[in-house]
Every structure is written in C-alpha cells, then in structure tokens.
Image: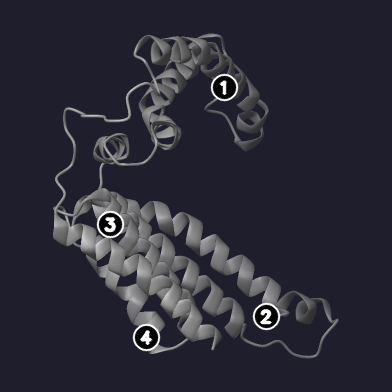
Amino acid sequence: MNKLHPFSGFCWWLWFSVSVWLLPLGYLQLAAALLPLALLLSDRDGRQRLGWLLRLLLPLALGLWLIHSQIIGYWLGHTNQWHWPWPATELWLQIACCLLAAQLWLRHCPIPKLVNALLSSRLPATLSYLLAAPLLLIDPIQRQLQQIRLAQLARGVPLDGNLWQRLTSLPMMLLPLLAGLLNGVSQRGAMLEMRGFRRLPQRSPWQAPADSSAQRRLRRLLLLAIPVQLAAALL
C-alpha cells in the first residue's frame, strides 16, 4: 500500500466505507473491521494510531449502549426490562470500520505526499490549494501552540492543573492562536499573488507522487463501483 498514489488510497477508503455501510450486521461486517485492525497492529505507528482511535470509539460505544439499551430507564425504574441495542451496535461497527480504514490510509500516506498529490493533480489550482492549505498549516499550528503554551506557563497560567483549570485557561491558548492565523492570511495572499496564483493552468511540483495508468484505472473502477452498489442496495 506504500506504493499507492494518495488518490488511489482515498478511493479505496471511500469504496470500503460505502461497502461497510451497505453490509448488514454479521460476520462480513465484523471481518471488514478486523482486516484494517490487524494491519494497524502490525507495526508501532499503527498501534499508536489505534490507541488514539480507541479513545474515541470506546466512549462512543458506551454512550450508544447507554442511550439505546434503555438501561438508564431500567435503573431508574421507568421500564421493566432492557435489551441489547443491536441497531446501535451495527452503527458503532460501521463507524469503527470507516475510522480504522481511514487511519490505515493515513498511515501509508504522509501529509507531504498528500499535499504534493493535491498540488500536482488536474484539479483547478484554487480547489487544490483550498484542500491543501489546512494540511500545510498543521506544522505551523503545532509550533505556534507550543510557543503559546510555554509563554502562558511562564506567565503562571495553570495549563497543567486540574480539569477545571485547563478548561478555564483554554481561551488563553486559542485566542492568540486565532490572532496569529488571521494575521498570516494577508501574508499568504500576498505570496500567492506574487507567484501568479491562478495564472498558469499547468503545474509541475518538485516531488509529485508516482502514478500509473493501472492506478488511474483502479480509481475509476472503485468510483464506478460505488453508485452501482448504492443502486443495487436500493433495488
């Protein structure tokens, strides 16, 4: 999967997610979840991504179970019985499959590679930059957040305190970050104007990801399979 073009990986994730949502709850859906799970467990980076993902999926599973099983009403005496929420279980498994596959794609598609693919694609220059601009801001935002955090700690702001102190001090982190991002908008616009943004229809980035006719055919096939699957499910 490392040799896949970023767009090929995205088309695979999109087709996989649609297929999972069309599958009924059963062994096929469980196998679809176990496949990206096993691939993520194969190395250290995948296990780290899986740890971040579990912090989202486990509270989501608990919330869906508490709401849809009527266990709270049973505890409070409003109902005489509670049941296992199979529709909520199916929904949680579908969400888990989509997120696991997305993490698997992102694991083999670094951010610089994805940015280069967007900027070297046949998409309009404005659309390419609109999609790539948030990715280009990840590293500057991380550096700026680190600088703001050190500055606020030096001023005595309790960023490392209890939960309430962290919540109350959150605006002191976000407001300088937003101010810095807004100040940089005019500079980025001026840089794009100086480089003749939207003047040249053809672009030639320095490190465009390798692509092939086989991968382009694969992307077309996956994108064609999605409406076919949706139509078959509706019929």
Question: Is 169 on the left-hand or right-hand side of 101?
Answer: right
Please give the label number shown on residue 21: none
Which residue was labeled with disc 1? 173
Mark positioned earlier in the residue sequence (3 or 1): 3
Name the foreground residue: 142 vs 155. Answer: 142
Which of the 4 quarters of the picture holds residue 76? bottom right
Mark positioned earlier in the residue sequence (2 or 1): 2
Q: Of the residues tagged 2 and 3, which is closer to the observer?
A: 3
Which residue was labeled with disc 2? 69
| Secondary-structure class at tag 1 | helix
Q: Of the residues tagged 1 and 4, which is closer to the observer?
A: 4
Please give the label number shown on residue 28: 4
- Picture coordinates of residue 159, whole percent (x, y): 55, 25
Amino acid carrying mark 2 in the image: Ser
Mark positioned earlier in the residue sequence (2 or 3): 3
Question: Is 20 placed above or below 142 here?
Answer: below
